[in-house]
Amino acid sequence: MKKFMIFLSAVLISFIASANHYNPYQDPYYEIREVTLEKIEDSEGIIQPEAVSLTGRKSSNGVGEVIAIGREIIAFGKEIYQIIEAGKPVVRTDYSPISVLPYSETRGKEISPINLSRWKGPRSVKYKVTYINGFGMEVVTFTYNINMSYGGSYKNKGYYITNAQIVPEYVSVAWGYSFNASMKLVGITNKGTQDFPIAGATLGLTYEVSTIIQEDRNNLTFFLSGDGTIKAL
């Protein structure tokens, strides 16, 4: 019995000593070891939220602010959207997805998606981001959809984009981790010709994870076009 008590005391002392020397800055739980990205779905016919005008410098066609202008195309919406804050989707009541529409000196800012015909879609591509810590645990999981309607023509010419957006579908963040994500319009291009424009939009997705010992920031870009293309760059 006496030997057992001595052994138990030794174990307790060892445990206390170990606890007193615990250093969270060396804990594998807080260490980001791996980040994975996978495309998990590509589909047509996804229902998207209805566009609502934003406050600020609005266009007169009800699709948000003017955020980029090209020779034959113009983009409306908002340049930057915060989509995840503190591990939770951002809830907005003043939300306008991005539209890339026809532009001309005299009428470019007045053209609305309802003035275009032959719209196709909506189209959606789903991606999943996973963060894995030093213990092999999935500590952050983020699933999101890249959505748009496409193929709209103006006076039987061109293919344009409306309701382009990155929408969070599922977010899971472990204790001790912080996760934020934002979307922005990087630029617009014309894949077609001056007489038959094919609108293109490059969207940027930035997401960052932080713990008490580490920060990790990733930037992804996706190209969307009026002919139905959605692809990671």
Image (spheres, rainbow, N blue to C red):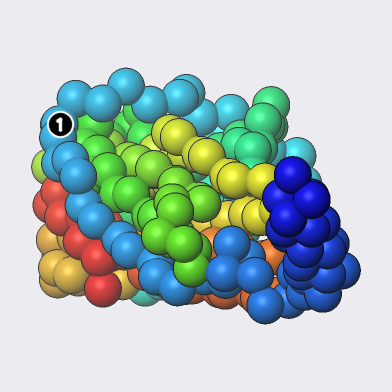
Q: Nearer the viewer, residue 1 or 225?
A: 1
Query: Would you say residue 97 is visible in this rendering?
Result: yes
Secondary structure found at label 1? strand
Asked where in the image residue 197 lies, by quadrant, the reply is bottom left
Q: Nearer the viewer, residue 117 or 23?
A: 23
Identify residue for label 1: 44
Q: Nearer the viewer, residue 38 or 135?
A: 135
Q: Residue at x 53, y 57 (%)?
A: 183
Relative to residue 169, is residue 194 drawn left or right?
left
Residue 158 location (% of width, % of height): 17, 53
Mark 1 belongs to which amino acid? Glu
Residue 32 location (% of width, % of height): 52, 70
Residue 96 location (% of width, % of height): 56, 38
Relative to residue 172, is residue 74 drawn left or right?
left
Where is the C terminus found, in terms of image quarters? bottom left
Q: Eyeballing the image, is 47 above or below 19?
A: above
Asked where in the image residue 19 lies, by quadrant, the reply is bottom right
Q: Residues within 10 Å of mark 1 (few under 14, many from 20)?
A: some
Q: Residue at x 65, y 70 (%)?
A: 27
Query: Would you say residue 202 is visible in this rendering?
Result: no
